[in-house]
Image (spheres, grey):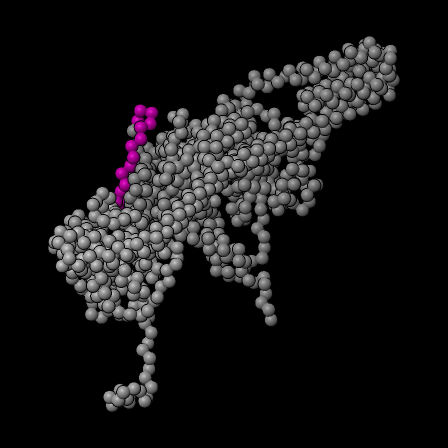
Amino acid sequence: MLPNDSQRPDPDALLAQVQAQEKKAARGRLRIYFGASAGVGKTYAMLAAARKLLADGQDLLVGVVETHGRQDTAAQLDGLPVLPLKAIEYRGKTLYEFDLDEALRRAPPLILMDELAHSNVAGSRHPKRWQDVEELLAAGIDVLSTVNVQHLESLNDVVGGITGVRVAETLPDTVFDRADEVVLVDIPADELLRRLKQGKVYQPQQAERASQHFFRKGNLIALRELALRRTADRVQDDVQAYRVEKSINPVWKTGAALLACVGPHAGGEHVIRSTARLASQLNAEWHALYVETPRLQRLPAGQRERILKTLKLAQDLGARTAIVPSADIAGAVVDYARNANISKVIVGRGHANFNVLARLWQAPPAARMASLAPDIDLIEVGLPPADAAPRRAAGEDAEAPRRSSRHWRYILAAGASLATALALLPLQPYLDLANIAMLSLLTVVLVAVRLGRGPAALASLVGVACFDFVFVPPRFSFAVGDFQYVITFGVMLAVGLITGHLTAGLRFQARVASHREARARALYEFSRELSGVLQTEQIFDITKSAIERAFRARATLLLPDDEGSLQAPNGGEALDIGIAQWAFDHAQAAGTGTDTLPASPIFYLPLIAPMRTRGVLALLPLEGAQRGRWLLVPEQRQHLDTFAALAAIALERVHYIDVAQGALLQMESERLRNSLLAALSHDLRTPLTSLVGLAESLALSRPALSPAQLDMARSLQSETVRMSALVANLLDMARIESGQVRLNLQWQALEEVVGSALRASGPQLQQHAVLTQLAPDLPLVRYDAVLVERVLCNLLENAAKYTPPGSTITVAAGVHGQFLQVTVSDNGPGLPPGREEAIFEKFTRGERESNKPGVGLGLAICRAIVEAHGGTIHAPPHAPGQGAAIVFSLPLGTPPAPPELEPDDANDHETGKPT
């Protein structure tokens, strides 16, 4: 029977699991000691665990620990290594914070960081301590930390509603959920109150105030329940993750995704936090959506700022955020839910002062969602607590002058209807009332196109009134003589309102489509311009101009040098290279609108290419009081990320074009040089051979030559031999570079090659003492004897050339692991420091300026021959004046077994008979 395909693990899921495990293995581990409130013993438990680890031999460091005057906790701190805090000047005072740079420099295996939700002093690298911990974890450092339940962002408003105290320092739930281990530290409420009275939680004055407010028994019981439930959710997640990892009884069901609808009212944050808690309980992903209608697009800046902050809160809590422009809220929500396969939509409960006219005009959005999508579950969230009830923001009152400045549109709309009536008054004898009514409706349509929905409604009302007063008998009176005109008035008003509404909606959709088309056109033009550039300077100019046009911000590119350090361009005095370098090194955005150094007015975005980060894009928003608000809009941020990705890919493409051109130029240069060397060596070899023969003949003609002539003949012989050796080196190098050398590999002993090399190098070694130190049990090695002999000759001649007469040259050989290692050393002046690797390059000599003969090819030929055998060659560093050594290794391999003798052959050997 074939196996059930449904029981087989998903290969993509297994690959994702392996990748996640590899990424997790490179990070440090985070353990959080979690409790219901202060005083339960989280810090004490963390220090006790640290002392046990230290006793077991674990190296650790205390980064930050807050004892709050508790003697038992301070006693646990004794004997633990503590990192000194960093002094920071703030408003004339010296405050002390965690020294992140020093901790990264020391890089301990484990560090203790108390109060994970703590807010750092302004001027620190990160505004929150949990962000410091994230950087420590990314560096591979394990962290122990503590958190209270009231500091979790999703429970902040719940705890505030219970205790009446809103905690300002909060921690994103994603940080808590990503912790590798959560340890619950819990004690009963009565025990905690007893500890409070004994002064083990706060000092006496603080304890008295706390017992009257936060530390009431009912509060502590409720907080304890929240902590237990949150820990239970966490344990459930751990169990589910373990089941998935071990493929234990796979469950066939789909997790229900959630969609939180963000509105313009102040209760949006309550909807977001409620959805985050529900998503955590269901272990489901969730989205946050804001539908921007034409009416909402004209909201005051304060309300729009609040909406963007609400979306940023949702993003911090782990949601995927989106802003969708549409005139139909319910239709846009349903479309988004269907496209994202979301089965549950979370909406806020309507306010009591909901616009009655809007209810008469159309059903509430929730009711319309239910009718449009009966298969989607709608969950209505109650109003926030009384202390967080929606109130008019202070920023909205500041918008009153701005709203009053818009009244001219309504005045213009009413004036247009009055002007139309006055213009038609002289034409009344020539036009029917139906035509006059049509011309009034035309005015309403034009007002809707130019001024929007509200002015169009006013123009419709004023137009009907003017039509009744001026043209319907009895004229110049609002009295109606014929009832049929009442129907005409109603139809005119309805047609005017509907026409104005539809026209304003089309105007809004046209404006949205125009914005989208402009963004698409900007991306198209940007990518088209980048596709043909071949220089980094062109990318710099194109990117700067394109982003400045699209985002109304001053832009510049910071590119790294060969060492990875960013270089500030000319005119970039306002840039902070430290922040930019951090964004480049960590591949994360920094500066305004982010969680890393948000006080900086400049936004730093790394240019991440497929292979590596290619630079940093720095933007200075230029929007006056609303500076940088567009960074909070998800669609705008995605648009900017696309620009950055295109620029990064262009930079990487240009980089590899330069690399390819350099490699091609180097290949062509090598090919040309090898061709020249081969041609010269072939053309010079024949006449040099003749010269060597003639010089030897002259040196042997002693009776016919005078002593001076004999010396000249011997000098001629030595110079021609040296020249012949140089030409041979050139020819060998050309053959090796062209790949024409074929190795004649045979199993043979090293001693024979060493002996032949010493004989061949005899003339060069006459004034030196040669010492051989060959191990007695050297095995057979498979190599080309002629080429290895050439290696030894070059090494011996090189040692004789660069050592004074009388020096000792040693040839040693032995087995080291799976290699046969041969060393040629001397006791001369040695190699220049730092040139141990450079001497093996072609046309490189041990002494740059020297009268010693040679062109610097001997060691290059040795490396080429040894590497062709699968070995290595190098020069170990020595102190100046202690000689030099060249070591090369050849792989041992497995020698073939000796052939077995036939029985008759064995008997012949035993009797001494010839075979």
Residue 474 image offset from top left, x and y in percent: 85, 11
State the residue lying farthest toward the front: 704
Q: Residue at x 28, y 57 (%)?
A: 689
Residue 41 in magenta stretch: no
Using the image as rendered, state which of residue 279 and residue 440 is in the foreground.
440
Residue beneath the point at 76% across and 14% down:
420
Q: Which residues are magenta?
A: 76-93
Q: Is residue 81 magenta?
A: yes
Q: Quadrant of residue 330?
A: top right
Q: Quadrant of residue 767?
A: bottom left
Q: Give residue 703's quadrant in the image.
A: bottom left
Considering only vertical position in the picture, is 5 above or below 601? below
Which image quarter is the C terminus in? bottom left
Left or right for 768, reference 84: left
Left or right of residue 413: residue 621: left
Q: Nearer the viewer, residue 753 or 141?
A: 753
Q: Position of residue 195 (x, y in %)?
A: 34, 42
On-image quarter of the N terminus? bottom right
Q: What is the x, y in percent for residue 674? A: 37, 50
Q: Does any portion of residue 192 appear in the rendered image?
A: no
Residue at point 25% right, 66% down? 753
